[in-house]
Image (cartoon, rainbow, N blue to C red):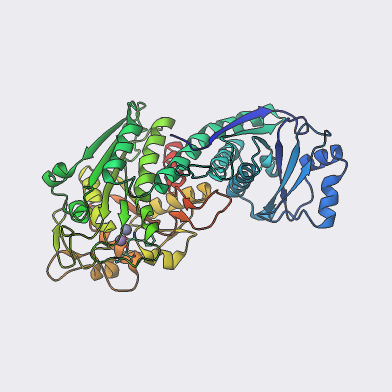
Amino acid sequence: MKQIINVKVKTRKAEFAASKTDMLVVGRFSDAGPDETIQALDRKLGGGIERLAKLGDLTGKPKTYAILYGEGRIAADRVMLLGLGEQKRATLDTIRRAAAAAANRAVDMKVKRIALALHRSFGDRLDAAAMGRAMAEGVYLGSYRYDEYVAENGNGRLGSLDVQIVDPDAARIKGLSTGVSAGTIVGQAQSYARTVANRPANVINPPALAKIARDLMRGVKTVSCTVFDEKKLQANRMGGILAVGSGSQNRPRLIVLKYTPAKKPAQGLPTVALVGKAVTFDSGGISIKPAQDMDQMKFDKTGGIAVLVTIKTLAELKLPVNVLGLIPAAENLPSGSSYRPGDIVTTYSGKTVEILNTDAEGRMILCDAIAYAAERKCDVIIDIATLTGACVVALGAYKAGLMSNDDDLVGALQKAAEESGESVWRMPTGEEYAEEMKSKIADLKNAGSRWGGACTAASFLQQFIGQAKWAHLDIAGMDVFLKPTEYGCVGGTGFGVRLLMTYLMNLVKEK
Ligand code: BES
Ligand code: MN
Ligand code: ZN
């Protein structure tokens, strides 16, 4: 998938002091002394590291770092000592974030080649392949920048970054390499997801997104890409998608991606449907949103992008599991042809919905796609959507809402969340919430009371899942970084790519 900065991650068997690089990156915990790697380096550097520690300039606290210069005493020009926080609280995500912070800093410093030895601080506590994957993912996330539309690249950033993960031990290098291969594919996928997310609504509208999907899957033998245009949506009576798309000149689409691996999936492995909301711009429609921050609503397509990129990544990794990707795409605008409050819409399932608020459009496009997945007898349906402001009120920008009818599926997604660093928090659905979504003049209405909006929205979707095991990810707070972080620049996060990929990779691994 097309990258903005050309980042390469490789492993290399080498002694740390002998690694020729612009910057060697090692980690340091806040509650432990220097480990062997640091001690050995410090001997060559004449004790400079410990002098920094004594001065209090090297605390090991998260998000802190110090840089020393090699001055010919070691092969590296610089040594970056990165704070890893408390050792007892360190996880795989600690390594991912540290690698991201290093790559992020390297891009800002215009450093071309870095060598990572971050995994050394963890000894054998974590699996080498898992650490390799986390570091590679971190490098791609941290080095990410979005300047496609900046004619003159102001800070003159470099076009490439070369990363070596070094270790003197051959066996460990082997493990790390396995992880780096997977981490590179997933990391590049997530970077590409961020790029498509960052593109504005005058560039990415539903037909343009469909073209990206087609181009991405061209030549990929294991993925079929079918795009439902307006005629086909009409023929299929997909009233929800058509209603939301009715206000815009850019007509709606349903992108259908079917991944059938060359290798037959193991017996008993479920067929999974991934359904992603792609509202390319959400003005609210006739129930128009306030002007403040409306520009952020170009990110209302990010659930759909996560699904698109995940399907492509499955094909690249040749993962043996059947997955159907469904991306309903529409632009929600007010005009003379828009759907209105009070309208009654007949959805693909046959259920009718009274529209109370045209800004509750996500559920209207998702319910058609979810009903389509249920009809195809998918065993598991996972939908992912920037669905409600209420979810952001509840959880902030730290965790995605997770609603489900199946405890095992919740467990699997929580495990994937922990491993991938893309956090989720379970929230309820069920009878009381569903009750609020009943209409007097139609089967359902599209908006409930003021309270519990994330849960009533999920309960609305639950009416369309048939017999499937179902999980809903409300990523409304997770789609965008409002401030720069270790994960690179502000803008799209690509949230969901790592979470969904980890869930599917675990599914295959555990069979
Ligand atoms: N796309 C929005 C949800 C959203 C809000 C995403 C803030 C990211 C940040 C969604 O379509 C929406 O407008 N939801 C309404 C639903 C309401 C009208 C029932 C909301 O949350 O206000
Ligand atoms: Mn809306
Ligand atoms: Zn929306």
Q: Position of residue 481 (x, y in %)?
A: 49, 55
| Residue in front for this viewpoint, 375 or 474 | 474
In which quadrant of the rendered image does the N terminus lie?
A: top left
Q: Residue furthest bottom?
A: 450
Please tell me which residue is depicted at 59% across the width and 48% down the height of the picture: 97
Residue 362 versus residue 327 in the image, above or below? below
Residue 232 versus residue 399 in the image, above or below? above
Residue 476 as seen in the image, left or right of residue 488: left
Q: Position of residue 204 (x, y in %)?
A: 33, 45
Is residue 307 visible from the viewing direction of this image? yes
Q: Position of residue 413 (x, y in %)?
A: 43, 50
Total marks placed = 0
Residue 432 as seen in the image, left or right of residue 442: right
Residue 166 versus residue 479 in the image, above or below? above
Question: Ligand 3: which quarter?
Answer: bottom left
Is residue 124 visible from the viewing direction of this image? no
Q: Quadrant of residue 441?
A: bottom left
In which quadrant of the rendered image does the C terminus lie?
A: top left
Q: Quadrant of residue 405?
A: bottom left
Q: Quadrant of residue 195?
A: top left
Q: Residue furthest right?
A: 46
| Residue in front for this viewpoint, 391 or 416 | 391
Residue 362 versus residue 131 in the image, above or below? below
Q: Position of residue 23 (x, y in %)?
A: 71, 38
